[in-house]
Image (cartoon, grey):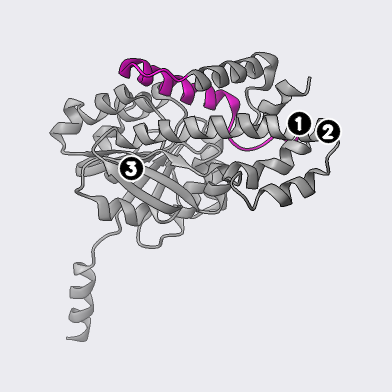
Amino acid sequence: MLLMFHLRNHSLQKSKPKYLFAGLGTMGFPMAGHLSKNRNLDIYVFNRTSTISAKWVKKYNGTQLIDLDNCSVKFDGLVTCLKDDASITSVTLESGFLDFLKTNSFIVDHSTTSLNLVTTISQHPKILDKKISFFDAPVSGGEAGAINGALSIMLGGPKKKLLQINNLMDSYAKNIVHIGPSGHGQLTKMVNQLCIGSLIQGLSEGVALGKKSNLNMNKVLDAISGGAAQSWQMDNRFKSMVNSEFDFGFAVDLMIKDLKIALNHSNDLGIKLPSTKSILQNYKKLSTLGDGGLDTSSLIKLLEK
C-alpha cells in the first residue's frame, strides 16, 4: 500500500515548465543566468553563436540548444533578448521556433524594436492559430542592472498570463510595470531613450566644463548629486566620464538604433524632437570615428577633442 501511495503521488506530479531563452549578449547572458536559479522551471538557452551558449551552460544550470534538428522539447514560453528587428524576426518567425511552442504559450521579447515588428509578430497567423500571447517587454538598467537582477521592465501585451510572466521576470527585474496592450512597452522604451539621451548630453557638457575649469570633480559630484541634477546616469557614469572610461555598458550603435526608432515614430505623429535629432547626429559622429561599441557616456569625447 505504501509503494502504491508513492507511485500514485509521483504520477500526479506536474512536470516543470520549460522555457527557451534566446539571445545571450551583454544583457541576455546574465538575465538567463538569474532565470536558471529558479528551481521550479527548466531553462534552455539558444544563441546563434553556439560558443556563447556553451559558455553559459558551463556557468549556469540549464540546457544548450544548438539547433532544432534534434529538438524533441515543446516549450511553455520563449524569452528573447536580441539586438534588432531583423534578429527578432529571424528567431521568432523564420527559424522554426514557433513549431516548438505549445498552444497557449507565450513569447516575451526584451529587445528594443519598432512598433511595426510588434504588430507583425503579435498578429502573425501562426501566433494567432496557436493562441500564443506576445509581450513586448523592453528593459532599462543597463549591463549592471542585468548582472544584479535589478532591471526595470516596460511591459506591453494582453492581461492574461501576466502573473505567469511576472513570476518569470522577477528573476532578473526589480520593477515590472504593465503599461497597456501590445506596443505600449516599446512606446515607453522610446520615452525612456529620449530622456536618457538628453541626460547624457547634459552630463557630458557639465563634466567637460568642470574638467576644463580645473574643478575637483569628486567634490563637484558630491555637491550636485544630492540636488535636482541627480540621476541614474550621474550616479553611474559621472566618475567614469571624468576618467574617460567607456569600455562597458550600453553601446553607442544600439543607442543610434533606438533613437532612430523613436524619431521615426515621432515623425509619424507629427512631433518635432530637435534635441533628440542633434543627439543622434552626435552619436553617429562617434560611430563614424570607430567608437560605436563604446558606452553611450562616451558622448563627452566629442567635447574634449
Residue 209 is marked as 1
The answer to whether 303 is drawn above or below residue 81 in the figure is: above
Asked if residue 70 is positioned above or below residue 228 in the image, the reply reads above
**Dominant SS in magenta:** helix
Inspect the magenta stretch and tell me whether residue 249 lies in it: yes
In this rendering, position of residue 146 left or right of residue 296: left
From the image, state whether disc 3 or disc 1 is nearer to you. 1
Q: Quadrant of residue 155?
A: top left
Callout 2: 10 Å neighbours few (<14), some, many (20+)? few
Range shown magenta = 244-273
* Residue 290 percent coordinates (x, y): 68, 18
Q: Is residue 24 left or right of residue 77?
A: right
- Name the image quarter holding the N terminus: bottom left
Three-letter amino acid code at the position of disc 2: Ser
Marks 2/1 in contact by CB < 8 Å: the verdict is: yes
Task: Tell me which amino acid carries mark 1.
Answer: Leu
Residue identifier under label 3: 155
Q: Is residue 256 magenta?
A: yes
Residue occupied by mark 2: 213
The amino acid type found where label 3 is placed reads Leu
**What whole-number distance in Å separates the C-alpha atoms at marks 2 and 3?**
44 Å
**Residue located farthest toward the left when viewing the structure as drawn:** 129
